[in-house]
Amino acid sequence: MMNVAVRKKLLPANPCAGVEFPVKVKGLFRPHYVGWPEQQRIEFRAPEYLRNIIRIITESGLRVCKELMPMKKDRVDLENSVVWIPDSKTPNGIAEAPLTDLAVDAFREQIRIAGGVADEWVTQLLRQGDAKVFKKYSQMKLQMKREALQKINRKANESRTGFDTEKVN
């Protein structure tokens, strides 16, 4: 952009012209994936609120800054094991996301620490006349997402053990 500004004579010179970008060294920038034993060690030493956050992030895959930090209690439906994400990094991220049992427990504990919200308030915030109406319309969609989540979890567990049940069947 700076070079374009120089060409259009909006800037006398590019102040970044002499900057050298670091060279990516092979293997230096590999991500670290936390395994279950390591996560348990971290959670054991963490305060309760941080344990819940760690569990929610690892179990749900929520993005920390864009999705989890601005999260409000009214976006969490513990009864249906789902969380509503109204703003995300990508348009596809704006959706209901199914939660694992561990994530539901972590959200429940975090809400307990922060103070709970009655189901009636959540129903009103979602602009539903009755909690049963909301549950009825969301059940089929949630069930499909839950099934997909179970398949993903099963695949992840199979790849950890090196045993693929689909190949056996």
Image (spheres, rainbow, N blue to C red):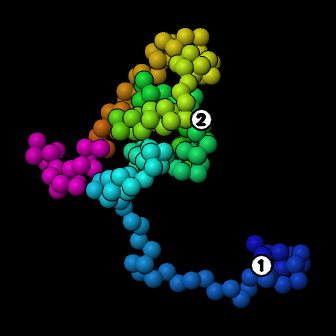
Residue in front for this viewpoint, 98 or 111: 111
Amino acid type of disc 1?
A: Asn
- For residue 57, say whether it is visible: no
Residue under the point 35% across and 59% down: 34
On screen, residue 118 versus residue 154, left or right, reads right
Which quadrant of the view contains residue 146? top left
Q: Is tag 2's residue or tag 1's residue first in the polypeptide sequence?
A: 1
Is 124 rendered above or below residue 48? above
Neighbourhood count class around disc 1 (C-alpha, 10 Å): few under 14, some 14–19, many 20 upward = some
Q: Is residue 101 above or below residue 1?
A: above
Numbered label attached to residue 3: 1
State whether the magenta stretch is mostly helix, strand or loop: helix
| Disc assigned to residue 116 | none
The answer to whether mark 2 and mark 1 are in CB contact below 8 A is no
Q: Which residue is mark 2?
A: 72
Marks 2/1: CA–CA distance: 43 Å
Q: Position of residue 128 (x, y in %)?
A: 59, 15
Residue appearing at x 58%, y 46% in the figure:
69
Q: Secondary structure at mark 1?
A: helix
Q: Is there any visible trace of residue 157 in the rendered image?
A: yes
**What is the x, y in percent for residue 5?**
83, 75
Tag 2's secondary structure? Answer: loop
Residue 96 drawn at (x, y percent): 50, 33
Furthest-left residue in view? 168
Q: Which residues are magenta?
A: 153-169
Residue pictured at 35% horizontal, 39% vertical:
102
Q: Quadrant of the C terminus?
A: top left
Q: Nearer the viewer, mark 2 or mark 1?
A: 2
